[in-house]
Structures are given as structure tokens and as C-alpha cells.
Image (cartoon, grey):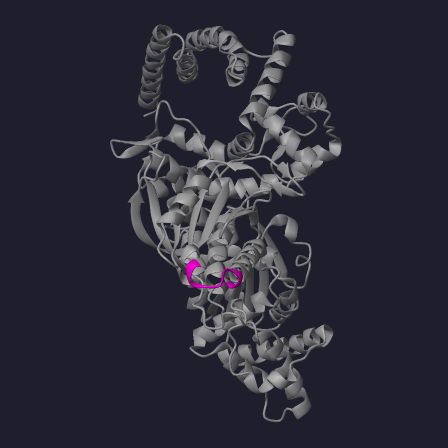
Amino acid sequence: MVTALFADLVDYVRMLAEHDPEVVRARVLAALATMADSIERLGGTREKFIGDAVFAVFGWPTAHDDDAVRAALAALSIRAALQDPGLNDAAAPTAEPLEVRIGIATGEVVAGLRMRGADGDLGLTGEAITTAARIQSLAQTGEILLDGATLRAARGRLATEPRGTVVLRGQSTPVELLALLGEAGMSAWTPFRVGASGPLVGRERESAVIRDAIERCARTGIGATIIVAAEAGMGKTRLLDAAAPTARAAGFAWTWTESVSYGRGEPYRWARLFAQTVADEQGVDSGSLARRFVFAPDMDAATARRYGGAIAAIARDASFSGWETEASHVLTDPTEVASALLEVATRYLERMIVELGPRVIVIDDLHWLDGSSEGMVELIMEAATRARLIVLASTRPDRLDRWFGRPGVTRLDLAGLAEPETARLATLVARAAVEADDARRIHLRTAGNPLFVGETVRAYLEDGTLERRDGRVALADDAVAHVPLTLRAVLGARIDALEPDARAALDVAAVIGIWFRPSLVTMLLAQDGTAVTESTWARLATSSMVLPAEPGGETWRFAHALIHDAAYAGMLASRRRRLHERVADDLESRPGSAAAGHIGMHRAAAGDVDRALPLLREAAGSAMALGAADESASLWRRAAELAEPTDPVAAAADRAQAVAAANAARSLRETAGQEGR
């Protein structure tokens, strides 16, 4: 899954006609370099320059769970940078600013490295690439257009304006177009992240811990730090946001901040954001509020110059104002700047607490905190042990060592929702009761991860996998499981972060199925010369992607079906077919090791129709004889799909069997429901 970006300079031909070609060339080269810098700074890959245009991708070769946001921010950066007068050299000081049209699209591609001289050309192929290029051609001068898939993948982080739908040249499905206005303000996107449209589901114990800490702080004047640790999607942000009413009722101000992966290289990013957020709350400029908190009438001139110079050093590239008089005293020694800023932060916090009263400071995604702001966060956590100050933070479980164990710090680990809670959340998202069996299937597929539950239900509603029946929703009889676009980026980033041996093992395990034996994976990979060791499996278990089915057992399983499906979808089809063939050969070489249907599914996935069909039909009949009507229907449908291209008559017969089995399954469920009542 990638987000593709095409940026094209406007009026290149006209500029050549009206200006010295040498000057135009210099300006265009400078513009292309600026565009490439914006792309690479946000973690994208410049795939190629095409004349006066640039093509880039976000998500390959390195994936992030926010690639759609990164691409959009890169586009905004490109547009802003081209307005910089510095792009005009002395040869064209009065030339008009360069303008650009940009198109952005998100989707699945095939990427294969092919060498071109000394450069690597990623060789990307997929509809997202052509969609981005065609969208770019529709954009007006200075406009950034993106498709609906990019907006959904950004999960609320972008501010856009609808531009209707269009059928692009060479495509048959209408594409939703939106004009990018900017990054959504925190007040706009936080509700999207926390799911504020509905109540918090589950988490009673964790909510009580946070509530008790706030109420205890209000009584005693002693605060605390609570760090919520969990994998992406477990509802860390939602849990923290749910504490806001409690905090405000107790008289605490509520300051929400966040860190982002693409901001880790920006010095003092979080510190600046915190100061700006507090200042916005007070309706004043962040620099002016800092001056009020930091400086005292009796402060000696040397200290004042030192503090002012330290703040001015970071204010030059931020939105701080009111520090122009300190510009001549800007500190240049990095050690001196860091030392002075810690002193400034200490004074700032002390005065903030005294003047503004008790406060809850939320630091969402603490694991992305920039290194230069860590000192200030440590000061805040330390201050919480002696003042009316509560710090609530969220982080990934593998990024907690630095913070956990400090005085006054409590760790909360979030696991997946229980099955009844998953059913409740699915019902809230669907706005209708979900059939009990289907809610159970959703729970098994998502392991109760709230984000995965919500996005899966939404995707199923959009594509008809979940059907509305008599005021309830149920999975369609021919439902085919898939991974929603919004989750492909989250899961893909985790998978791409694996080392090569672990990624190879995960791929082969995904072909085998949700349940697998590591020994078989090791054997299949050895045929390709890839070594898998105990360390490989230990790392995969630590990543929470796969785990032993039982302690010391020979069988392992994927943590949940979505990880399995994301790993499976990330492989080239040709590689999947080869691996399915090897798995089927191994199963058939060991009599009694697998049922006919299991082997038949592997033969079908390998493209071996002649050997797959008799196995699938045999298995479908056996399943029906055992009363497993749902499984029988699924096997008959798969047989019909395989038979259709070469034997339509047999395919029709298979479909009839599938309908009969599905009707039998529905009748069995209704009978069971009546007996239960």
C-alpha cells in the first residue's frame, strides 16, 4: 500500500518561450531540488523526475502508518516552498513565483527494484500511480487534489473540500476528488481518532485508575503520571480523551498535545506545541506568555540575556513572536542552549502551575517524542509528584523503558476488548444490532482491537459484506474477508519493520494459514536458502504478530486474522502460488495430515485447477454430511469459481449446491435460535 504523489510545474512551455532558456532551466532545477527535499524530509521516496514534474511514493520501500498524511504534508510543503523568492536567482529577480499542480492517490501497487545505471528505479505498477497522475492533470494552478482513498487512509488528519467524482481516463470506477486545504487542526482530528461520536466501550478498570488519580490530586495537591501502553489501535487515545469530563469537573485545565513520527527530527517540536497550546488556551501569543512566566523584575541582566537568547534560538523557526530584541543575543553553543532551555522550562512550569492552577497534560504518542523535548517532559513528570498536575501519556509497549519506573509513574497496559465488548462496539458502529455469530467472527478476526473492529465494520457496511436485515446486520452468505484500506497502512508498517528473516517467515506462515507449524515454515524457506532460527520466532513473538498456540507446543498462530491477511496480501501473487504448491505437496506426502478441503484450497490458490476441483467437491460433500453447512457452502462456491472459465455447466451445478448448503445453514441457525429462546 502506497500513497503516490505527482507534482507538475505550471506553464513550463510558456516560460521557455518568454524567458532565457538558461534562466528557466536554473529555476526549474532549483524547484525540482526543493520538491525532492520536501518529499524526502517527510519520509517519501522520489521515484523519478519527468521533465518539469516529480513522481514520489510514500510507503515503499519503508512503510509508515501515516504515509497518506506524510504525502499530503509534502505537497503542502512543495507548494509553499515554490513561493519562496529565494528560488529566483539574480538573473530573474522579478520573475513570477513558480506554480504547481499536485495529485495524490492511495492504493496497492507492485514494486520491484530494477537497476538503471547507478540509480535504483523502484518500478512501481498499480492503479494508484495512474490515478495520482490523472488527478494531477485535473488540478487547477496551485491546487492539490487527492482521492477519497487518501482521505480515508489519513484518518481525519487532513482538511479538505469536496470536488465531486470523476471517471478517469482508462478506468471504470468513479474516483472521489477532494482539494487539500491543509492539516486538520487538533480540534478537528482528535474526535476522529478517539471516536468521540459514541461512548467508550469497556476499559472500566483503566478509566477508574485515571479518574482516581485526578480526584486524589484534587484532594491532596499531589499529582501523578499515567502512561497507557498498547499496540496501535487498542484505544489509548480514546481512553485518555474520556478522562476530560472528570478533569474539568475537578477544576483542572485540559491541555492535549501529541507527537508525530515525521516530527522527531524537528528540534523542540513538542515543547513548542505545548507552549502554543497553553497560550491558545489563554488567548495570548506563545512567546509573550513565555516571557511572562520566565522573566522576573529582579532578574539580573546576564541571566535575562541568556534565557532570551536560548528562547530566540528556537523561536526563529517557530511561531514565537516578541523575541526580536533578543535576536542579537541568540546562543550558538548547543550545550549552552540546551542547559538554558531546561532552566527556562523549569521556571515556565513553576509559574504556569502557580498562575493558571491545576492541569492535566496529555501527551499522545509519547513514543514519537522528539529528543530535544525529552528534558521538558521529564521536568513535567517530576513536577507532577509535588503539584496539582496530572500527566497522561500513551505509547507503544516497546518504547516505554525510558519513562516507566520513574517516581510517580503508573503503567496501564491495554489488551483487546472482550467478546461482548467487541459486539457492543460493532453494534455502535453499524447503528444496528450485529448477529451474535457474526459479532463473534468479527472478534476473532480483530482480537478485540477497537480500531480494527470499527474499521472492519465500516468497510463491511460500505461494500455490502454486512447486510441490513430486519433492523439488524449480518454477514452476507458469500462474505469474503478483506483488510480495510485504513488498516493496511497500520499493519503494513509493522510488517515492513521486521528484519528480512522474520518477514520471510511471516510470509510463508501466512500461506499456510492462521495456524501453522514453525518447523514447516523453516523447511519451506530452506528450499530457497533462507535460514530461520529460534531467534526469528522469538522476535516475531515479541512483535505480537504470531505466538505459540500453547506454551511449549509445536503449533503457532497469528495474533489475529487481520495480521495474517495483511501479510498474505503483501506478497507477489507468483510467490504465493509457489508457496501454496509446496504446502500442498507437503500435506499430500504425509497421509492423514490434512483433510481434502485443506489440500484442495492450497491447490486452488496455487492455480492447479485440475487437482483442486475433485478435492474441493469431495470436501464439500463430506462437510454437508457432518452438518457443517456453512463450510460446505464455502467449498462449493470456491469450486464454482474455479470451474466457471472452462466448464460453465459444472460451475452452475456447484453454485446450486452452494445455494442449497447456504439455505441449510440458515435453517440450522434459525432452529438453534428458536431452541435458545
Q: Position of residue 155 (x, y in %)?
A: 43, 49
Residue 406 in the figure: left or right of residue 250? right
| Frontmost residue, 115 versus 371 | 115
Q: Is 355 drawn above or below residue 635 in the view shown? A: below
Q: Where is residue 369 in the image (x, y as percent from the top left)?
A: 60, 60
Per the rendered image, the range of residues in magenta is 17-23
Q: Where is residue 572 in the image (x, y as percent from the top left)?
A: 56, 28
Check the picture and name the quadrant holding the C terminus: top left
- Toward which corner of the image does residue 315 lie, by quadrant? bottom right
| Frontmost residue, 32 versus 574 | 32
Q: Is 127 drawn above or below residue 223 in the view shown? A: above
Considering every residue shown, the one lying at the far left of the view is: 470
Q: Residue at x 67, y 43 (%)?
A: 118
| Frontmost residue, 642 versus 351 | 642
Q: Main secondary structure of the magenta part?
A: helix
Q: Which residue is drawn at 66% across and 36% down?
A: 540
Q: Residue at x 42, y 55 (%)?
A: 13
Residue 640 in the figure: left or right of residue 507? left
Look at the image and say whether residue 464 sits in the magenta stretch.
no
| Frontmost residue, 337 versus 429 | 337
Is residue 190 visible in the rendered structure shown here? no
Q: Position of residue 610 (x, y in %)?
A: 50, 7
Q: Residue at x 67, y 24 (%)?
A: 521
